[in-house]
Image (cartoon, rainbow, N blue to C red):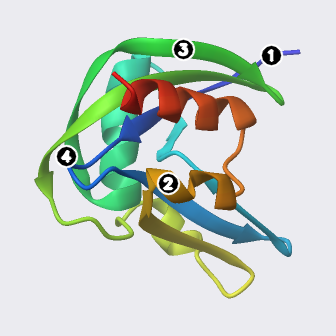
């Protein structure tokens, strides 16, 4: 089985909030860290920067890779990212095109204190956000 590679960003602001992509798909509500598939010729870090811009309209810089995780057919690369510019909103990438009443995307700043109330997947992502916030 070939794993699909994706990159994701942990973005925190100065209000002790983390940027999450809230999702509703096939009647299921959950959240993910901004990110997506790594394209041919891209490094995971380059994909992370591109995906954040496409998904949430923010230009970011990424630090060293924090974690590589195998998760449900994906090889996921996690990076701490810092916002350089942009206004957070649903970006102009595929998410905006695919968004519908049954399959929607909503980027939101979520207080770290409320992280347990969000169905953030995978569970290891929640732990990683806490580890990064504690640094």
CA distance for labels 3 and 1: 19 Å
The image position of residue 63, as x and y in percent, is 27, 18
Label 1 crowding class (10 Å Cα cut-off): few <14, some 14-19, many 20+?
A: few
The residue mark sitting in front, 3 or 2, is 2
Q: Nearer the viewer, mark 4 or mark 1?
A: 4
Residue at label 2? 113
Residue at 83%, 30% in the rendered image: 72
Check disc 3 and report its element: helix, strand or loop.
Answer: strand
Separation of marks 3 and 2 at Cα, in angstroms: 23 Å
**Residue 67 placed where, x, y %?**
54, 14
Residue 118 visible in image: no
Marks 3 & 2, CB-CB < 8 Å contact: no
Report the residue marked by disc 3.
67
User: Mark 2 and mark 1: span between their CA atoms?
Assistant: 37 Å
Of marks 3 and 1, the one in the foreground: 3
Q: Front-most of 41 and 63?
A: 63
Residue that mark 4 sits on? 59
Q: Which residue is mark 1?
A: 2
In the picture, the quarter occupied by the C terminus is top left
Does residue 114 sit above or below 84 in this rendering?
A: below
């Amino acid at each position: 089985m070939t794993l699909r590679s994706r990159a994701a960003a942990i973005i925190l602001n100065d209000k002790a909030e983390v940027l999450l992509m809230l999702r509703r798909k096939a009647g299921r509500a959950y959240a993910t860290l901004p990110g997506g598939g790594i394209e041919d010729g891209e490094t995971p870090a380059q994909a992370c920067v591109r995906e954040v811009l496409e998904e949430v309209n923010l230009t970011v810089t990424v630090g060293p890779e924090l974690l590589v995780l195998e998760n449900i057919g994906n090889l996921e690369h996690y990076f701490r990212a810092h916002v350089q510019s942009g206004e957070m909103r649903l970006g102009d990438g595929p998410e905006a095109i695919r968004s519908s009443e049954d399959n929607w995307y909503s980027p939101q700043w979520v207080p770290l204190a409320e992280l347990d109330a969000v169905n953030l997947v995978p569970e290891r992502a929640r732990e990683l956000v806490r580890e990064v916030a504690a640094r």
